[in-house]
Image (cartoon, rainbow, N blue to C red):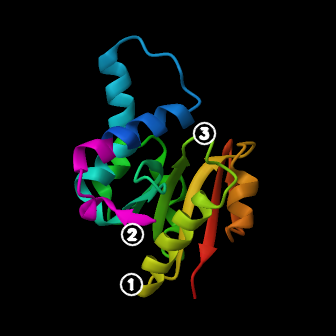
Amino acid sequence: MLVRLSAMPKHESALAALEEIFFLSTLRRDFASAEERAAFFRTWTGWYVERAPDDVWFALGDDGTVIGYLTGCKDSAGAVDLARTIPKYDVFADRFAAFPAHLHVNVRPGFRDHGIGRALVDRFAEDCRADGLPGLHLVTGVFARNVPFYQRAGFTAATQRGPLLFLGRRLG
């Protein structure tokens, strides 16, 4: 089942699960302090939870456990404060008109390769399409392990700039 953050009955436990999955999924493992770890998490998720809770989706297992999440933003160009938070956010700003929405998705280990990430992406894409948006995108590393997943999910418009790869999915 897919549920928006704003509709989750246990808001705090859902956010705790999001944080757990985030750290299980990130490549960064070492932090100098608990404060640095918390700041890293806030950099990559805080804005979405605070400013776009209707664009944060959870995948729930049969028992109601959070097994994946998607954080999204439907107006990348208009999220000026997000550009100040996320490093290199504006590297692909010239692509935002055609692909205005963006997303991040993570699934709990043990539940990957079961279509959960794809279901989250497709749900957010449908939401964006219903809002009349022409496309959505994400930015990843050129050699990141998630590139084939996103290509299979319809992200075919690619632009590389240095080590970064912009992948866009048309919604029209």
Residue in view at x 45 percent, y 82 percent: 133
User: What residue is pinned by disc 1?
Assistant: 131
For numbered disc 3, what is the local secondary structure?
loop
In the image, is 40 to the left or to the right of 67?
Answer: left
Question: How many residues crowd mark 2 within 10 Å: few (<14), some (14–19), many (20+)?
Answer: many
Disc 2 marks which amino acid?
A: Lys
* Pointer 3 with pointer 1, Cβ within 8 A: no
User: What residue is pinned by disc 2?
Assistant: 74
Instruction: Please give the range of residues in magenta.
Output: 1-15
Which image quadrant is residue 77 in? bottom left
Residue in view at x 56 percent, y 58 percent: 138
* Pointer 3 with pointer 2, Cβ within 8 A: no
Task: Say if residue 52 shows up in the picture.
Answer: no
Which callout, 3 or 1, points at the residue further toward the start of the chain?
A: 3
Question: How many residues crowd mark 1 within 10 Å: few (<14), some (14–19), many (20+)?
Answer: few
Looking at this view, is 51 or 149 the one in front? 149
Q: CA gap, disc 1 to disc 2?
A: 9 Å
Q: Position of residue 78 (x, y in %)?
A: 32, 66
